[in-house]
Image (cartoon, grey):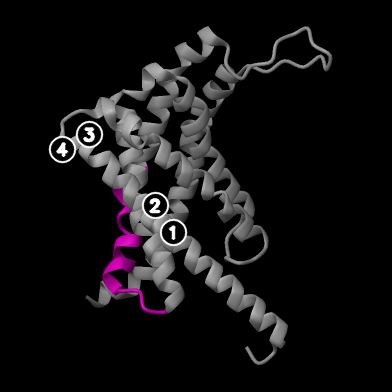
Amino acid sequence: CSGRTSTDRMAWSVGKVHLLVYNTVQAIGWGLCLHACVPAGWLRGDHHGVFAQAGSLIKVFQLASALEVVHAAVGLVPSSPVMALMQWAGRSNVLFLVLGAAQPVQSSPMAAVMLVVWSMSEVIRYPWYALSLTGHCPAALTWLRYTAFIPLYPLGVVAEMTVMYQSLQHLEAKKLYSVHLPNTFNFAFSYSIFIKVLLVVYLPMWFSLYSSLLRARKKKLGGKEKAA
C-alpha cells in the first residue's frame, strides 16, 4: 500500500464503496426475488405462477448484474471480464430472449426451478461479497458460499438447458430473433439453430467452470476442513 499515491488510494476507496453498495443492493434485491418465488411456487404448490410473480423483478437485478462485467474490465475485482461477460450473457439469454418470448415455457416446472435456484445462489453470493469487503464475513457464510454451488449449480444448468430445449418449438414456429435472406447485407441467422448449438456446447462449458469453482473451494476451505 505504501507505493500507492493519494489519488490511487482515493480511487480504490471510491471503488470499494461502490462495490459495497452494489453488492448490498443486489443481496437485498435477490432476497426479494426469492421471497417472490417461494410463495408463488412451493408454498402454494403452484409452479405456474413463479415467472408471473417474480419474473419482472428477476429481470431488473439480472440486468443490473451487467455491471459485474464492467467491474472486471476496469480492475475493481480480480475476475476475467470475458468470463464475467459469458456468465452474464448466458443467463440473460435464457431469461430475456428464451423465457421472455416463449410464453408456453414460462409456466413449466423447470422454469420455476431455474428462477428459484438462481435466487438461492445469489442470496448467498452477494452478501458474501459485501461482508468480505468489510472484513467481517462470518466463517459459516464463507463455507456456504463455497459449498452451496455444488448442488445448486448443476441443478440450475439442467433447468436452463431444459428451458431452452422446451422453447425450441416455439422459437422455430415464430422464427424469433432470426434474420432471413434475401436482405441488404446478404446475411442469415437462425436463433433456434443457435440455441441447438448452445445446447451442444453448454455442458462442456459448464463443466470447465464447475471444475474451476471446485478448485477454488479446495483452495479456500481445504485446509480448514482438514483441520476440522
Q: Which residue is mark 3?
A: 41
Identify the mark nearer the N-term, 3 or 1.
1
| Image position of 84 with respect to 205: above or below | below
Let me know if residue 46 appears in the view. Answer: yes
Q: Residue at x 57, y 60 (%)?
A: 79
Q: Residues within 10 Å of mark 2 (few under 14, many from 20)?
A: many
Q: Which residue is mark 2?
A: 29
Q: Amino acid at mark 3?
A: Gly
Residue 15 horizontal side relative to residue 5, left or right: left
Q: Are marks 3 and 1 in contact (CB under 8 Å)?
A: no
Q: Which residues are magenta?
A: 135-153
Most foreground residue, 85 or 215 = 85
Q: Residues within 10 Å of mark 3 (few under 14, many from 20)?
A: many
Q: Are marks 3 and 2 in contact (CB under 8 Å)?
A: no
Q: Residue at x 57, y 16 (%)?
A: 176
Q: Amino acid at mark 1?
A: Val
Tag 3's secondary structure?
A: helix
Q: CA distance from mark 2 to mark 1?
A: 6 Å
Q: Which residue is mark 4?
A: 43
Q: Which residue is mark 1?
A: 25
The percent position of residue 36, horizontal first and vertical second, equals 29, 42
Q: Residue at x 37, y 44 (%)?
A: 118
Q: Residue at x 35, y 31 (%)?
A: 51
Tag 2's secondary structure?
A: helix
Q: Are marks 2 and 1 in contact (CB under 8 Å)?
A: yes
Identify the mark nearer the N-term, 1 or 4.
1
The percent position of residue 190, horizontal first and vertical second, equals 63, 16
